[in-house]
Image (tube, rainbow, N blue to C red):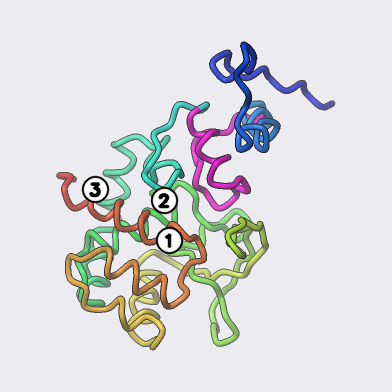
């Protein structure tokens, strides 16, 4: 049975001579469906097909904070204790990877938090966790285990959902070592190396190398790294 879509909050209703914006009209049905299905924790997650306008509106309805890109903040819906636990669990691995890459451990930790939703949106191989905290895909040269997962890619500015193959690791330590080895050895990412505490330079180097297709990726990663750096975890 298909459940009825809930009514939207009164503050978003039209009338009285006020017209809905084009952006609101284009996402109204999607937002209603989203609320009906109980969404709200992972606005910027890999399964989110809405446009930037749609994600922003959806976040407002869910009562979540927005970042400067129009997408929800990377920590939205995840409490501070869970964030602290995640950072503590990966700290030794982040420090080892950061030393090899020539960047701050906070930047590596932010990258893992952004890609995995603070460890709350793990890529899975069936019911097992792949420990792939960085969303690294399994190319033709990859000899390890592989897991197929749904993800969102941006093509000509539009979000498109796809099933892609990702690397699967036996543990987080292996995942961090592979992440550092991949960035350090691939010429595409050389501009991301040795950025020190400059998260923007690191993120820009990743983006130029094609690490992610999200047009707001540099801003999201830079902002999250700055937040982690100034917070006493």
Quarter of the C terminus within the rendering: top left
* Residue under the point 57% across and 57% down: 124
Residue indicated by mark 3? 227
Judging from the image, what secondary structure is the residue with disc 1 in? loop
Circle 3 Cα neighbour tier, 10 Å, few/some/many (<14 / 14–19 / ≥20): few
**Residue at the disc numbered 1:** 133
Q: Which residue is mark 2?
A: 119
Residue closest to the far front: 17
Give the image location of residue 172, x and y in percent: 38, 64
Q: On the rendered structure, is 152 left or right of 95? A: right
**For residue 189, above or below residue 176:** below
Q: Which mark is residue 233?
A: none
- The residue positioned 77% from the left and 21% from the top of the image is 4
Q: Earlier in the sequence, mark 2 or mark 3?
A: 2
Report the quarter where the N terminus lies.
top right
Q: Nearer the viewer, residue 201 or 48?
A: 201
Position of 146 with respect to 233 (left or right) is right
Q: How many marks?
A: 3
* SS under mark 3: helix
Do the residues under discs 2 and 3 have CB atoms within 8 angstroms? no
| SS at mark 2 in the image | loop
Mark pair 2, 3: CA separation: 17 Å
The stretch of residues the image draws in magenta is 37-60
Binning the other alpha carbons within 10 Å of mark 2 as few (below 14), some (14 to 19) or many (20 upward) gives: many
Question: Dividing the picture into quarters, in which one does residue 19 lie?
Answer: top right
Indicate whether 103 appears above or below 139. Answer: above
Q: Are marks 2 and 1 in contact (CB under 8 Å)?
A: yes
> Which of marks 1 and 2 precedes in the sequence?
2
Is residue 137 covered in magenta? no
Q: Position of residue 133 (x, y in %)?
A: 43, 61
**CA gap, disc 2 and disc 1:** 7 Å
Q: Position of residue 8 (x, y in %)?
A: 62, 19
């Amino acid at each position: 049975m298909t459940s009825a879509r809930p009514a939207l909050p009164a503050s978003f209703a039209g009338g009285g001579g006020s017209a809905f914006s084009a952006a609101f009209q284009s996402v109204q049905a999607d937002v209603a469906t989203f609320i009906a299905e109980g969404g709200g924790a992972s606005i910027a997650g890999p399964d989110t097909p809405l446009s930037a306008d749609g994600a922003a509106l959806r976040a407002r309805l869910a009562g979540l904070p927005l970042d400067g890109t129009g997408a929800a903040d990377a920590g939205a819906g995840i409490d501070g204790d869970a964030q602290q636990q995640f950072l503590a669990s990966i700290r030794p691995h982040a420090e080892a990877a950061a030393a090899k890459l020539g960047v701050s451990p906070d930047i590596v930790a932010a990258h893992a938090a952004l890609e995995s939703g603070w460890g709350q949106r793990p890529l899975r191989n069936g019911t097992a966790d792949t420990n792939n905290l960085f969303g690294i895909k399994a190319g033709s040269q990859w000899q390890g285990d592989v897991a197929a997962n749904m993800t969102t890619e941006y093509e000509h500015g539009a979000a498109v959902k796809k099933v892609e193959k990702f690397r699967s690791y036996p543990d987080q330590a292996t995942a961090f070592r592979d992440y550092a080895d991949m960035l350090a050895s691939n010429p595409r990412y050389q501009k991301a190396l040795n950025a020190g505490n400059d998260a923007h330079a690191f993120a820009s180097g990743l983006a130029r190398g094609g690490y992610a297709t999200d047009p707001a990726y540099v801003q999201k990663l830079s902002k999250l790294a700055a937040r982690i750096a100034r917070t006493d975890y």
